[in-house]
Amino acid sequence: MESQEPKVTVSPLMYSNRVTLKTILESSDGEMVLVGETVVVGGWVKCYKEVKKHRTSDTDHASAGRQGLTCLGILKSRIPRFRTIIRILCGPARPPAVREELKPLDPEPTLPSTFFLQINDGSCTSCLQVVIDSTIAPVSAGQILPTGTCILAQGVLEELSANEKQIIQLKAEKILHVGTVEQDKYPLSRERLPLDSLREYPHIRPRTTMVSSVTRIRSTLEFATHTFFQKYGFLHVQVPIITTTDTEGFSEKFHVTTLLGKTSKEKEPFGVSDADVVSLETAKAAVKEKSAVVEQLKRSGNNKESLIVAVQDLQKTNELARLIEEREKSKPETAVKPDVLNFNDDFFGRPSYLTVSGRLHLESYACDIGNVYSFGPRFLADKTESSKHVAEMWTVEVEMALSELGVRLCILKAHVCLIDILHWSFQDAMECAEDYFKFLCKWILDNCPEDMKFVSKTIDNTITHRLEYMTTSSYDKISYGEAVEILRKVPDKAFETQLQWGVPLTAEHLSYLADDHYKRPVIIYDYPKAVKPFYVHLNEDGKTVAAFELVVPKIGTVITGSQNEESFNVLSTRITEFDLSIDQYEWYLDLRRHGTVKNSGFSLRFDLMVLLTTGLIDVRDVIPFPRSHGKANS
């Protein structure tokens, strides 16, 4: 006797009876093995179609609701025009032996419908067709049809014909939930919105296939980050978002204070609200203008009524100007400038900021427990309009102390010079940054195949090939000086910024090096000390520092890193050179006073990594709720 294969059971979500569409549409065993399974699915309607069933015949209606009537009676009752024709042709109807009263007609029954809905629950790019027969699962068209409606349905998975785009659909047996939508106000019910328009609806845009796909890629990259560092023994440390330290030394920062806005809540003088008060300058200008009108009317002497009205208007304006002037004199000082605030009365008792970087705080843990990393938001109050920067961006930061790569190099080499020893920690950071970057590229290709197919088809058809190439290729490492020499030799390239040693490399400089010259990622190191933060290790030449950048084609700088200055005296001097308050950095200097250790690290701008893997060009389209200058609408 042949044994029957066990029936496939679809596993629902933990803590829910619902099965994700990804489980059905991307089944490792194929979709057809799920045919016949009863499941609960949910999602939002992407598009819909309603098919009315055929009207039943008149004979069926007669047998169902018109028994006892003759055919001629039914015809006369349903078609008044025929009654007139029959009366003319046949004469008056012969009265029946027993008079029969005609019953009033029932209202025309609503025809049953079949609804075909394409729904998506955000778990994958594909949609599942849900078929609802209104005779089995009663719903109204207005309740379920509009795009954006949320439904939860229970039914049986069934096979579709071979000529259909999909091979499986759900035949609904029960509708468990319907979340209606105001179609005239729903932004996604209109024609397809471009990405820049979708930014106006950050709370709704995740329902689009594009944004949901980007979100899944972003989530996968975040998981890959923790996987990489946990695999290699790094500890995850949360660093503060609020800090009293100017982390970079020259960045635009957001102040955190409770002092601003602490104004008197007393009733405004003269019964005039803020909304009704114009500036004193505007009021005086109006008085001058209306005085001229009165003088002109007086000279003409033709229209006394207009003169009376003009004089009354002038008097009212004069009174308003007087009230505003008195108000200004008696108004308490409310607009306090930040530089004259008494921070002793503030919440933290001293100036505080949203952090630009967490590397200094992370370093304190690296100097105690070795290799650590952090992942969180960083803030920069830069008003520059850029497709690669917003005010709040997420960053992966890494610090390594007591690393072993330099020791391994020492063993492998017959002799090691002093410069090699000084750069052991620095080389560790560069190697770790490159390995981590390649790990992310490979992880996203291996774990998001369907989403990568979607972005390749809709955004950039070269993205998969580029990620594969960046995963397998070797990266050139050049010094800042070598980069300057390469850029100076470009004959037919006119850069906006005049290139000379000591100035920062601009986006167009970096783009040329990665996109045109090397055509792959490139690592640039040993930057001039003036263009990097104060804490970066000063090289022996006294002009450059041990800092590096990983520059990627089409994106620019994705990773910045450095070896940090371990010398107490050098670090103190650098703080003074940057005109920073030494008091802010006493805690940081303590790391040099007590058990100095060489350490290095880097920062990966996570949002730019998402931008790279999706092929999009504006970072605001890969951040769930972007905050940029003048834009924070949710």
Image (tube, rainbow, N blue to C red):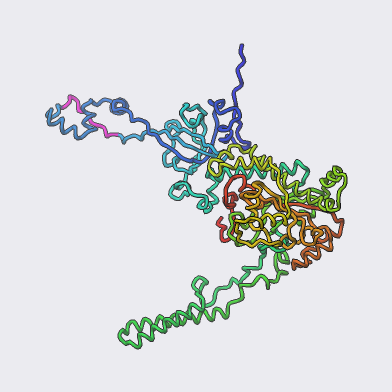
Residue 564 figure quarter: bottom right
> Residue 330: horizontal and vertical position, in percent?
58, 79
475 and 70: which is toward the camera: 475
> Residue 320: horizontal and vertical position, in percent?
47, 79
Residue 220 figure quarter: top right
Q: Is residue 375 something that shows in the picture?
A: no
Looking at the image, which residue sits at the far top?
A: 1
Whether 543 is drawn above or below 288: the answer is: above
337 and 531: which is toward the camera: 531
Whether 477 is drawn above or below 64: the answer is: below
Query: Which residue is drawn at the image coordinates 82% and 59% (left, top)?
Result: 540
Q: Indicate yes or no whether the magenta region holds residue 99.
A: yes
222 and 450: which is toward the camera: 450
Q: Which residues are magenta?
A: 95-105
Q: Indicate yes or no whether the magenta region holds residue 185.
A: no
Whether 382 is drawn above or below 164: the answer is: below
Q: Main secondary structure of the magenta part?
A: loop
Number of numbered discs visible in the structure rendering: 0
Query: Which residue is drawn at the image coordinates 61% and 49% (left, top)?
Result: 554
> Residue 248: horizontal and vertical position, in percent?
72, 60
| Left/right of residue 450 with respect to residue 278 in the rendered view | right
| Left/right of residue 565 with respect to residue 275 in the rendered view | right
| Left/right of residue 368 with respect to residue 616 in the rendered view | right
> Residue 38: horizontal and vertical position, in percent?
54, 28
Quadrant for the C terminus in the image: bottom right
Quadrant for the N terminus in the image: top right
Q: Is residue 134 something that shows in the picture?
A: yes
Query: Which residue is drawn at the image coordinates 42% and 39% (left, top)?
Result: 140
